Structures are given as structure tokens and as C-alpha cells.
Amino acid sequence: MTKEVVIFTGGGSGGHVVPALTIIENLNKEKYEIHYIGSKNGIEAELTNGKVDTYHFVSVGKLRRYISVENFIDIFKVFVGLIQSIFLILKIKSKNSIVISMGGFVSVPVVIAAKINGVKVYIHEQTTRVGLANKICSKFADKVMVSFEDSLKFFPKNKVVYTGYPVRKRFYDKEVKYNAVEDFVFHPSDREVLFITGGGNGSLLVNEKVKESLKELKSRYKIVHQVGKAHINEYEGFKDEHYLPVAFLGDEMPSIYKCADIVISRAGAGTVCELMALNKRSIFIPLKIAQKNEQYHNAVEAKKKLGSLVIEEDEFKKLSLIDVISTFTPYTEDTVISFENSATQKILKECDLILDEGI
């Protein structure tokens, strides 16, 4: 049986790639051949390795909302990427191929090329505020899917549909996989578990706040702290039975979220949606320089639905972390949403794709 080709694109950050991988993980592999178009050295090339049938790279130019000399160079790169994408899609597409775009600069030439080649285009927007790439791509899309209902207003009514964010399946079950980090967390203790993360690269602001109150935090909590690769050497020196600094957390993140009594985090769309899926009230410190202050608006969604605490950076700088935690009352019950109601299935349905029943 000849497989139908499904082409994914999106990149520039893990926030665009991880939800794509969630959709890919749930596709019926007997029916579909999965291709991914990204940049040569972007994070999408690394994260999709071994998880798609074929990875292709094209030239990528950054899109800016402001005047810059670099815009002239990048316009040329985008044009080259468009020509490459046109011939690439022409070569790999099948009769009923579709393109699913997750955003980021690399997606623009791919989406336009798909439209030129007569291939249907589906876009997924992860954040509450729309990125420039998806704003452009939406003009060529057959359908736009959004993670938050508040984002519906940014797209044409005849194209947009609310599906939610495709949270990884591991968040929807109660299974906990153990490793060195989780052994630390689950080691018998009468203390609450405090998980602090500034994102995959860490956050100097969050890390410094932890360091200021670390002695008192250690006296009260069992702490897992994702500090980022650039900071791990410094924070390794503070490690003891009550405090575990880690450079980066990957597949073990769902288990850490599940067992944590309190989570302090930045507010990327993926993080917010994953914690909302677990019904986990959290403390969010949105990244101030995020495009259109999108992290703040992401966090506000969790505040409205779960009562999460949102503290903007300027305010957070003035506060003691101990005081912040002391005034916050987290939920003690983690109500897990059933997988049958997940956004992933809604996205597959909107794209007329078949779920792998073995998942």
C-alpha cells in the first residue's frame, strides 16, 4: 500500500517543534509517510532526528517588523527557501498530501510553496498572541487551528478553529517513569516538592532569586531546579539532599510536573498548556521580552482557568521568593484530563488524519 505523505514544518524554537512531534507520535504510521522541512542547523533538525521518515532543510531568513539592513539579505534567503520548497514539495508530495505548519520563520516559504503546488495547508498557533510568520502563513492556509480561544480573533472567522494545544500523551496518564532526577523527588520525605524552571536554557533572574533564598528554601522544601546549561557548574555547588540542580529536563519533565506540589516557571505556551492539562496551579514569571508579551497572556489563561499566580518580571525583582511561595496556595488534587478529549485528536480530525489506535 502506498502511503500518503504528510509534510510538517516549523522551527526556530522547541516551542514550535514539540507540538509537531506530539501530532507525529499519534499518527497512524502504517498509512502515512512523515516528512519534515526545517532549517539546516535549527533545533528542529535535532529534535526530529529519528522521529520522522525524512528531514529536509531549506534556506531560512528572519522576518522582522522593523527596518534593518539585514532585512535585504534575509529577503533573499526567504526567496531561495521558497524556490527550494517549491521543487521539494513537488518532488515528495502524494495525491492527498497536506502541509501542517507550526510556525517560525522556516514555515513561511514552505507554506507558500505548498499553496503554489496545490497542497492543502493547515496551521497551528501555539501562543495567545500571533507570531508574524503565522500571520503571513494564515493568508495561504486552508485552516488555522489555535491553542487558546482568545486567539480566535486574530484570524479570519471562515478559517480559524479552536483545537487547544497538543499536549504530550505522557501528561494524560498516571504513569511515572523513574530516573536519577525522579529518584531524588520520590525518595521518602514529608516535605513538599518545589520545582523551579526558567525554561530549557534557564533564567538568570529566576536563578538569582533562588540563590537569594536558597538556605530557607532548603529548610522547607525538596527542590528540583532546572538552571540551564550555562549555569549548572555554579549551582552544582549547592547540591545536597534537599536541593537538586539540573541543566536540562527532557522526557522526565511530565513526571516532575505530576509530583510537584508547587511549580515556578516561565510561561511559554507549551509549559502553560501542560500544567493546565494537569490542573496544576502554578506560579508564572513571564519573560518580559517575549514577542508581544505573549508569555504574560499565556499565563493569564492559566490564572483565569486555574487560579495560577502571575508575577511580572519588574515586580518579581522586588520580591522575596519565600514570600511569593508563602502567599500562594496550590491545589492538592491533580485532575488529569482524559486522552480522548485531547487537542491532539481534534487537530488530527481537523486535518482529516487517522489516529494510531495503538497509541
Image: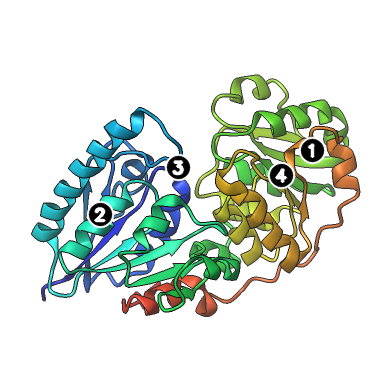
Is residue 215 positioned above or below 110 on the image? Answer: above
SS state under label 2: helix
Is residue 174 positioned above or below 188 on the image? Answer: below
Taking the spot 54% from the left edge, 79% from the top edge, the residue there is 341
SS state under label 1: helix
Query: Mark 1 touching mark 3, by CB under 8 A?
Result: no
Query: Mark 3 touching mark 4, by CB under 8 A?
Result: no
Query: Mark 4 touching mark 1, by CB under 8 A?
Result: yes
- x, y percentage for residue 148? 57, 67
Q: Foreground: 358 or 5?
A: 5
Label 4 and label 1: CA atoms lie apart by 7 Å
- x, y percentage for residue 145? 44, 69
Is residue 147 shown left or right of residue 142? right
Q: Earlier in the sequence, mark 3 or mark 4?
A: 3
Taking the spot 40% from the left edge, 72% from the top edge, the residue there is 359
Query: Could you say which disc has been placed on residue 285 in the image?
Result: 4
| Residue 178 shows in this picture | no
Q: Earlier in the sequence, mark 1 or mark 3?
A: 3
Q: Amino acid at mark 1?
A: Phe
Label 2 and label 3: CA atoms lie apart by 20 Å
Query: Could you say which disc has been placed on residue 146 in the image?
Result: none
Residue that numbered label 2 is attached to: 110
